[in-house]
Image (cartoon, coloured by chain):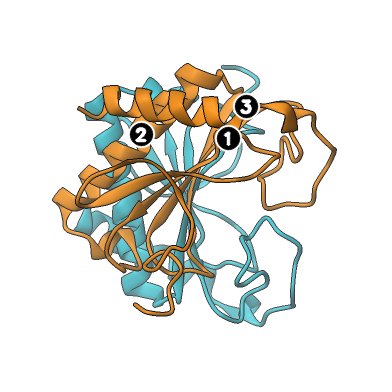
Chain colours: A cyan, B orange
């Protein structure tokens, strides 16, 4: 769909992909390691997918959760498929920490505090996550 | 766990349950039909479950999505597993409408408007959703 930013991405940091979906690293200084898993086709709801595609998509979401837990040791993982603004299936996979900008609220609630995570080496993190995703998803 | 409100629920409207999880109807006047799917055991993350249990849990989440779409025709379904405040696995399954209290933002963001949904017959909705869940999940 021409007007959809997930159908026509301009800049994305892709960590892993296959013919059905891709894992991208979100650029958010508050949440290093925040990933999105994006379905390739423009589909609105999980129950619009076949059971096989749904299982594949979720296996990639849970692989991203596994890799973030192993690599970053967050206090909690948040998973969400919302799509009110961009109704093209995508999952947010967010590593959360007790001291992060919104904890214990969801990242979409009012900000609670400033954080000191901006100094993380994004390039090294990207390589580490991409490498682990390749290992987990082969 | 004695201190966990999902291990020791006081009042819940259970729509469907089996030995592993339950679907409850959330009492929220802004969001009639808002359901939660709660894992029975006190487990923190999806990747702490076995692959079989994870697939079963998600099949119930997607059944709830299917039933809410069929019964309420929302503009979008929102799915989320957060658990920052109650780290006992539960999925929010939320029917969203263009005119609802927070649209197009997540329900955890700042409220945007008042809504006129409070007049919905909660008892009838409960019966309808419970009946459809039994049909879909047998």
Determine the residue positioned at 69% across, 40% down. Answer: B29
> In whole angstroms, how far apart are the C-alphas of marks 2 and 3?
24 Å
Locate residue A132, reporting x and y percent. Answer: 28, 63
Q: Residue A49: give its label.
A: none
Q: Are marks 2 and 1 on the same chain?
A: no
Mark 2 touches mark 1? (CB < 8 Å): no
Q: Nearer the viewer, residue A122 or B22?
A: B22
Please give left or right for residue A2 compared with residue A129 in the image.
right
Tell me: residue B131, above or below residue B22: above
Q: Nearer the viewer, residue B78 or A122?
A: B78
> What residue sits right under mark 3 in the picture?
B121
> In whole angstroms, how far apart are the C-alphas of marks 1 and 3?
28 Å
Q: Are marks 2 and 3 on the same chain?
A: yes
> What residue sits right under mark 1 in the picture?
A83
Locate residue A78, reporting x and y percent. Answer: 48, 59
> What residue sits right under mark 2 in the picture?
B62
């Amino acid at each position: 769909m021409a007007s959809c930013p997930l159908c026509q991405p301009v800049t994305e940091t892709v960590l892993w992909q296959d013919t059905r979906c891709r894992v991208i690293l979100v650029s958010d200084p508050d949440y290093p390691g925040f990933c999105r898993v994006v379905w390739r086709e423009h589909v609105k709801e999980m129950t619009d997918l076949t059971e096989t595609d749904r299982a594949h998509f979720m296996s990639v979401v849970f692989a991203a959760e596994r890799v973030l837990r192993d690599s970053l040791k967050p206090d909690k993982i948040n998973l969400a498929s919302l799509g009110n603004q961009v109704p093209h299936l995508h999952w947010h996979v967010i590593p959360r920490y007790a001291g992060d900008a919104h904890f214990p609220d969801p990242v979409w609630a009012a900000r609670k505090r400033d954080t000191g995570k901006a100094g993380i080496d994004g390039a090294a993190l990207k390589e580490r996550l991409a490498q682990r995703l390749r290992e987990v998803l082969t």
